[in-house]
Image (cartoon, rainbow, N blue to C red):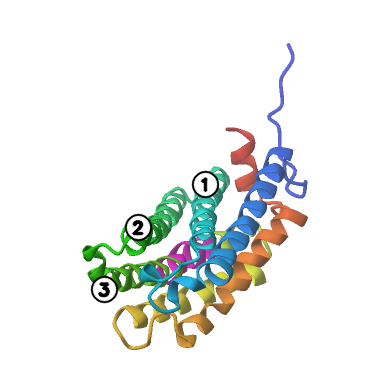
């Protein structure tokens, strides 16, 4: 009679290939979120905030590309959440769900911002160029839609990100040791700073989108960028409780 000994996992072994592949996917998706969000905010959307865009000649193609980039940003955001969920769900199931929910809520705000931009462009094309009498009220409508777009950024990436990518993901990465704890500490620092600055903007203590809301986001910026690059180059660090859970799915 042959007795089969239970397999003992090697604590010091490298992560399973499936975990390495997931790390690479998450890392590249984080890089995509950077490229799309920065391109939209800094390179493509500025004409919206220069005078009365809705009644002017407009740069529709440029602005519409910004909306498209943010649509890709939504896909990448959800991708990071779902891919990361497969890694952390066995170790921190409740926090894993919370992270996915926070990421989706961030995407909801981004989606509202996209709709406001598309509405501005549609109204400008339909009314402003024709000289219709209804166009007289377009500046007010345009200002309202631009303000809405600004607030979606201030509340989504400027507040909710601090909860999801900052506190929740930073805490999980710190506890599991899947990435260096010094790197994860940036999330634990940056998350509360974004929440505080975003809350201050919402309550009117500081101006939304001002330097006082931008500067506190620096640790979070380097946390997310560092996480993406680390996962692409190194992958997740060995953690048997998490690696084993992924292996036995």
Q: On the image, numbered disc 3 is attached to which residue?
A: 140
| Helix, strand or loop for the magenta stretch, by majority | helix
Dot 1, crowdedness within 10 Å: few (<14), some or many (≥20)?
some
Dot 2, crowdedness within 10 Å: few (<14), some or many (≥20)?
some
Tag 2 near tag 3, CB within 8 Å: no
Q: On the image, numbered disc 2 is attached to which residue?
A: 119
Q: Residue furthest top?
A: 1
Q: Residue 51 at x, y = what percent? A: 41, 79
Which label sits in the foreground, 3 or 1? 3
Q: Against 210, is 65 above or below?
A: above
In screen coordinates, is 128 left or right of 89? left
Q: Residue 165 at x, y = what percent? A: 51, 63
Q: Residue 5 at x, y = what percent? A: 71, 26
Dot 3, crowdedness within 10 Å: few (<14), some or many (≥20)?
few
Q: Residue furthest front?
A: 131
Q: What segment is highlighted magenta in the picture?
A: 158-171
| Residue 58 included in the magenta stretch of the image | no
Q: Nearer the viewer, residue 222 or 62?
A: 62
Q: How far is the residue under mark 3 from the one under mark 1?
A: 43 Å
Q: Against 163, is 4 above or below?
A: above
- Secondary structure under tag 1 reads helix
- Secondary structure under tag 3 reads helix
In screen coordinates, is 51 left or right of 78? left
Q: Which mark is residue 85?
A: 1
Q: Is residue 234 visible?
A: no
Q: How far is the residue under mark 1 from the one under mark 2?
A: 34 Å
Q: Which mark is residue 117?
A: none
- Please name the residue shown 37% across and 62% down the image: 129
- Mark 3 or mark 1, which has the lower sequence index? 1
- Mark 2 or mark 3, which has the lower sequence index? 2
Q: Nearer the viewer, residue 119 or 226?
A: 119
């Amino acid at each position: 009679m042959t007795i089969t000994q239970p397999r003992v996992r090697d604590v010091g072994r490298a992560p399973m290939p499936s975990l390495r592949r997931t790390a690479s996917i998450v890392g590249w998706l984080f890089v995509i979120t950077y490229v799309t969000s920065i391109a939209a905010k800094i390179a493509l959307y500025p004409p919206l905030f220069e005078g009365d865009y809705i009644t002017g000649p407009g740069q529709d193609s440029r602005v519409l590309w910004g909306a498209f980039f943010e649509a890709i940003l939504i896909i990448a955001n959800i991708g990071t959440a779902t891919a990361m969920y497969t890694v952390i769900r066995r170790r921190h199931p409740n926090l894993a769900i919370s992270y996915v929910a926070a990421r989706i809520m961030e995407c909801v705000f981004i989606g509202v911002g996209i709709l406001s931009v598309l509405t501005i462009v549609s109204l400008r094309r339909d009314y402003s160029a024709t000289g219709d009498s209804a166009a007289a009220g377009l500046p007010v409508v345009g200002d309202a839609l631009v303000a809405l777009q600004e607030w979606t950024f201030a509340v989504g990436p400027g507040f909710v990100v601090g909860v999801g990518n900052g506190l929740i993901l930073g805490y999980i990465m710190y506890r599991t040791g899947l990435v260096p704890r010094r790197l994860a500490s940036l999330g634990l620092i940056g998350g509360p700073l974004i929440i505080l600055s975003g809350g201050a903007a919402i309550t009117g203590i500081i101006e939304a989108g001002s330097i006082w809301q931008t500067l506190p986001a620096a640790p979070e910026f380097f946390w997310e960028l560092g996480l993406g690059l680390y996962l692409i180059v190194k992958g997740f660090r060995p953690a048997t409780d998490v690696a084993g859970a992924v292996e036995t799915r």
